[in-house]
Image: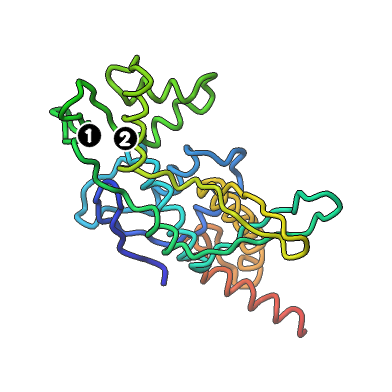
Amino acid sequence: MTEQILHLPVSGLDVRLRSLGGMEDLLLSEATTLDTQLAITLLSGLVQAVDGSEIELEHLTITDLDTLLLLTRKILFSDWIRADATCPAHHCGSRIEVAFQIENYLTHEQPRKVRGVEPADEIGWFRFQNLPVSFRLPTGADQIAIAYHPQPEQSLIERCVCPADLPTKQRKRVERAMAAMAPSLVQLLQGQCAECGAVVEILFDPQQFVLRELQNQARFVYEDIHLLAMYYQWSEAEILVLPRVRRMYYAERIRQTQKSA
């Protein structure tokens, strides 16, 4: 399947997500950093609102953006993700693998309603019914803005909470509400070494994991272009508009033909 209709968990938007093509592979293969800006640029060519309205991806919550990345990965590869690490135990060093399904992972991290929180007058903002504090949920634009800030957490609070200078107790209450309404998909996963029994924690960051995986495979686009242009006399533009799966299939058929020649 090269296209899916999805319901984004936080914004509630219904979107159409298509699979990657040649232009996205070029973008990935030539990227020098795997960051939120790259994720947004990539997704901007893959995502459309079902109702035809314009989507400003940078204003989607980080939760929705990471969801889109994970489901893009699911369309291309499979529902299963395998993350691995090296056992930290002394004199062990065995490989530890943690495997899980994307659908189960997303289901476990669904947004929750928070009692006592209601929409504020300003679109996208929320307020507490018994606390003079309003807030909004962090977006891709926020993540880009604080990426190189010396105090990113404080900078995020200043952007998303009003007033920002809250007592510790109130600030933690706001942070809990934000985490419930837009749960982070960056999580520590636990795995156990089959050799020595040691337990290890693996940090799973969907953005980094998916972009790196997509980039590793996207680098074959140059070889695919070369093969298809040489064998079929197609132009680069004609090759790049092919869906990735079809382009790779044609290129692999050429490789098999060359091997058997």
Residue at (28, 57) in percent of width and height: 7
Query: Is tag 2's residue or tag 1's residue first in the polypeptide sequence?
Result: 1
Q: Give, as a three-letter code, the residue at label 1.
A: Gly
Q: Quadrant of residue 31?
A: top right
Q: In this view, does 1 lie above or below 257?
A: above
Question: How far apart are labels 2 and 1 at the CA level?
Answer: 8 Å
Residue at (26, 46) in percent of width and height: 11
Name the residue that disc number 1 marks: 124
Q: In this view, does 204 lie above or below 59?
A: below
- The picture places residue 37, in percent across and down from the top left corner, at 47, 37
- The picture places residue 244, in percent across and down from the top left corner, at 52, 64
Q: What element carries label 2?
A: loop
Label 2 Cα neighbours within 10 Å, binned few <14 / some 14-19 / many ≥20: many
48 or 241, nearer to the observer: 48
Q: Give, as a three-letter code, the residue at label 2.
A: Leu
74 or 236, nearer to the observer: 74
Q: In this view, does 146 lie above or below 228?
A: above
Q: Is mark 1 on a helix, strand or loop?
A: loop
Residue 137 image label: 2
Q: In this view, does 30 lie above or below 118?
A: below
**Relative side of 227 to 10, left or right:** right
> Going by the picture, which residue comes out furthest to the left?
121
Q: Tell me whether circle 2 and circle 1 mark residues in contact (CB < 8 Å).
A: yes
Q: In which quarter of the image is residue 104?
A: bottom left
Residue 178 image label: none
Give the position of the N terminus as an image quadrant: bottom left
